[in-house]
Image: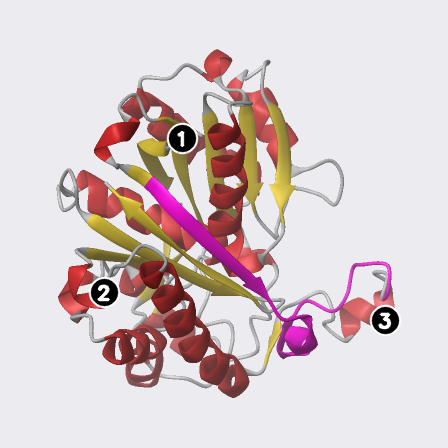
Amino acid sequence: MACTQIIGTGSYAPSRVITNQELEQRVDTSDTWIRERTGIQERRQAAPEEATSDMAVQAARRALDMAGVAPEELDLIVVGTITADMPMPSCAAFVQAKLGARRAFAFDVGAACAGSLYAMSVADQFVRSGQVRRALVIGAELLSRVVDWEDRNTCVLFGDGAGAMVLSPSPTPEDGRGILSTHLHTDGTLADILTIPGGGSRTPMTEEAVRAKLNTLHMNGREVFRFAVRALVDSTQEALASHGLTPGQVDHVIAHQANARILDAALERLEIPRDKCWLNLHKYGNTSSASLPMTLDEAHRAGRLQRGDVIAMMAIGAGMTWGSAVVRW
């Protein structure tokens, strides 16, 4: 099988900034409370006319430009999202049309905050098998439209954004560079600790459901925190061990960023210094599936990632879904 390389990255964040100080005027919270418990200082909000696919296309174009790949050369588009433009068709279908990627087949992956890692894993398998030569992986979320802006425990956490990666077979697989492996997990018995309960077949959207705010995000923060730290540590150790690597051999951590305390706890248990983890949570908040590829793009464009570096990726989302990956850059 061919080894898959990431040959281009891109990201997009809407221009509208919502600061902690602004949220102080909306709900019973404070800048100090938010910073101390989450590490977030501000987050982005999409313009009224923007949809998830619009943000996804912006990130995709930047990734394609870096990779030197035209949309017409794409064979596959996978979008990780839980906030597609509409229930049907997929966000990926809109992205394919807006890019003009006529050859590509396209679909969404719904794994919440782990969505882009799941999407990357799926695309990696297609590339390794030889069925696909150029794949576009996107994580995009417009969470500002599914949070309850009167719930101080959740509205302070989330932001809008998109990130993208272009995958391709390695031209020199013998050098060992590329996506070495991905490791995905799910525990559906924990589904109720992080949900958007309304809008599906179990609870169709009605006036009563909207009044009860069942169309917004509901979270048991304490349980999510407790599970997240353990899951991220275990899956990262699993991924490293599968290649005979130790945490001390990791050059960079590219992680989904939900909460600074979750990341700090996971890194401490892994014995990986915090300065090896690229952090942008303070600027964007939790952008769900967009977080990991946005973080990768920032680190890449800042020149932090050098040829041969070992990168550990990790993410966790509703489901509960979680996973890890090891990439040699």
Q: Kindly identify the residue that appears in the image at 35 percent across and 40 percent down.
A: 11
Disc 1, SS: strand
Q: How dense is the environment of label 3, judged by Cα within 10 Å: few (below 14), some, or many (20 and up)?
A: few
Q: In which quarter of the view is residue 185 placed?
A: bottom right
Q: Kindly report which numbered mark, 2 or 1, lies closer to the viewer in this rendering.
A: 2
Nearer to us in this view, 50 or 132: 132
Mark 3 in CB contact with mark 1 (< 8 angstroms): no
Q: Kindly report which numbered mark, 3 or 2, lies closer to the viewer in this rendering.
A: 2
- The residue indicated by pointer 2 is 246
Q: Is residue 83 left or right of residue 257?
A: right
> What is the CA distance from the residue labelled 3 to the residue labelled 1?
45 Å
Q: How dense is the environment of label 2, judged by Cα within 10 Å: few (below 14), some, or many (20 and up)?
A: some
Q: How dense is the environment of label 1, judged by Cα within 10 Å: few (below 14), some, or many (20 and up)?
A: many
Is residue 67 on the magenta stretch?
Answer: no
- The residue indicated by pointer 3 is 208
Disc 3, SS: helix
Give the x, y percent position of residue 114. 50, 57
| Amino acid marked by disc 3 | Glu
Q: Which residues are magenta?
A: 179-202
Q: Is residue 42 left or right of residue 204?
A: left
Q: Is residue 68 left or right of residue 214?
A: left
Give the x, y percent position of residue 254. 30, 55
Q: Kindly identify the residue that appears in the image at 59 percent across and 14 percent down.
A: 102
Question: Disc 3 or 1, which lies upstream in sequence?
Answer: 1
* Placement of the N terminus among the 4 image quadrants: top left
* Placement of the C terminus among the 4 image quadrants: top left
Is residue 194 on the magenta stretch?
Answer: yes
Q: Kindly identify the residue that appears in the image at 32 percent across and 60 percent down.
A: 240
- The residue indicated by pointer 1 is 167
